[in-house]
Image (cartoon, helix red, strand yellow):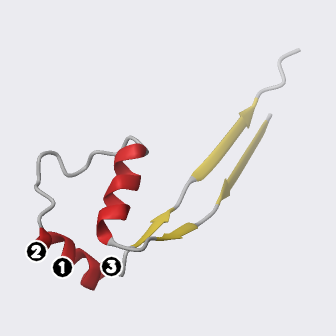
Amino acid sequence: NEVKITQELIKLSFDNALDVFRHLKLSGVNSLGFYPLNKGFLKEFEEKFQNKLTYHPVFILCKNDIK
C-alpha cells in the first residue's frame, strides 16, 4: 500500500479585478452568487488583493496493491 501527498501554490496575476472574476467564472467557481460586480466593489477588490489569485491544490494518490 502506498499514499503520496503533494501540493503546490499556483499564483496568478491579472490586469484588473474584472479579469479575476472572469477567470473564476470560466473555471466554474461561483462563490459570489448574485452579488453585483459594480465599480465600487471592483475598486475595493483591486485595493485589497492587487488582482492576484492563488490556488493551493493538494494531490493525494492512494495505491492499494491487491494480489
Q: Secondary structure at mark 3?
A: helix
In-image side of 64 versus 43 (left or right): right
Q: Nearer the viewer, mark 2 or mark 3?
A: 2
> For the residue carrying disc 2, how many other residues have a C-alpha within 10 Å: few (<14), some (14-19), or many (20+)?
few
Count of labels in the image: 3
**Residue type (three-letter) at the residue carrying disc 1:** Glu
Q: Position of residue 10 (x, y in %)?
A: 58, 65
> For the residue carrying disc 3, how many other residues have a C-alpha within 10 Å: few (<14), some (14-19), or many (20+)?
few
Cα distance, mark 3 to mark 1?
9 Å
Q: Secondary structure at mark 1?
A: helix
- Circle 3 sits on which residue? 49
**Residue type (three-letter) at the residue carrying disc 3:** Phe
Where is the C terminus found, in terms of image quarters? Answer: top right
Q: Position of residue 66 (x, y in %)?
A: 83, 18
Q: Position of residue 38 (x, y in %)?
A: 11, 64
CB under 8 Å between callouts 2 and 1?
Answer: yes
- Circle 2 sits on which residue? 40
Q: Who is closer to the viewer here, 45 or 16? A: 16
Which numbered disc, 3 or 1, marks the residue that appears first in the sequence?
1
**Residue type (three-letter) at the residue carrying disc 2:** Gly
Task: Say which residue appears at 10% left-offset and 74% top-offset.
Answer: 40
In-image side of 12 versus 42 (left or right): right
Task: Say which residue appears at 77% left-offset and 27% top-offset.
Answer: 64
Residue 43: quarter of image: bottom left
* Label placed on residue 44: 1
* Label placed on residue 12: none
Which numbered disc, 2 or 3, marks the residue that appears first in the sequence?
2
